[in-house]
Image: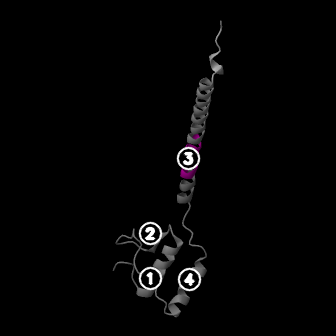
């Protein structure tokens, strides 16, 4: 007499959980691969960005903005140095952010010195 143990309701539920576990495990492995791929792509993009020189945009437009602001007597929008500012720095050290670079130039031209002096 042969017993078919896979036909009982409990066995069907157990088999379903087993299949579900295998599928979840396979899915997590796929996601882990995607995460590693995304991290590698982000690292490559960061490297490409850091290799390119800073572009302040249209230098003529920036100079015109600063000239107009000084002509109107407008104080710089940023009175305090950026949080990572270090003594001895110039505006050239802020070339990772156009707005901080622009505000530093405005501050320098308005007050005649860099932040923190």
Give above or below for 110 relative to 95: below
Q: Of helix, strand and loop, which one carries label 4?
A: helix
Q: Look at the numbered disc 3 and give the secondary structure of its residue.
A: helix
Q: Is residue 104 magenta?
A: no
Q: Name the residue under label 1.
A: 107
**Which quarter shows the C terminus?**
bottom left
Residue visible at 44% across and 82% down?
A: 107
Q: Which mark is residue 40?
A: 3
Q: Is residue 15 above or below residue 65?
A: above
Q: How far apart are marks 2 and 1 (CA)?
A: 14 Å
Where the N terminus falls, by quadrant?
A: top right
Residue at the spot of label 2:
93
1 left or right of 87 in image: right
The extreme top residue here reads: 1
Q: Tell me which corner region of the image, top left, top right, bottom left or bottom right, holds residue 24.
A: top right
* Coloring basis for residues: one colour
How crowded pointer 2 is (Cα within 10 Å; few <14, some 14-19, many 20+) is rated as some
Label 3 to label 2, Cα distance in Å?
Answer: 28 Å
Percent of width and height locating residue 100: 48, 74
Q: Nearer the viewer, residue 70 or 24?
A: 24
Closer to the chain start, of discs 3 and 2, is 3
**Viewer-closest of 12 and 93:** 12
Q: Where does the image place residue 101, in percent across and percent down from the top left?
A: 49, 74
**Label 1 CA crowd tier, 10 Å (few <14, some 14–19, many 20+):** many
List the residue tagged with mark 4.
63
In the image, 83 versus 4, the foreground residue is 4
């Amino acid at each position: 007499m042969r017993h078919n143990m896979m036909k009982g309701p409990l066995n069907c539920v157990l088999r379903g959980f087993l299949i579900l576990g295998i599928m979840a495990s396979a899915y997590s492995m796929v996601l882990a691969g995607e995460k590693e791929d995304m991290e590698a792509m982000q690292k490559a993009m960061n490297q490409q960005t850091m290799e390119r020189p800073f572009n302040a945009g249209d230098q003529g437009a920036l100079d015109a903005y600063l000239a107009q602001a000084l002509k109107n007597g407008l104080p710089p929008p940023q009175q305090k140095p950026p949080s990572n500012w270090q003594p001895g720095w110039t505006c050239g050290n802020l070339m990772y952010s156009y707005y901080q670079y622009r505000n530093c130039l405005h501050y320098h031209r308005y007050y005649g010195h860099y932040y923190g002096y």
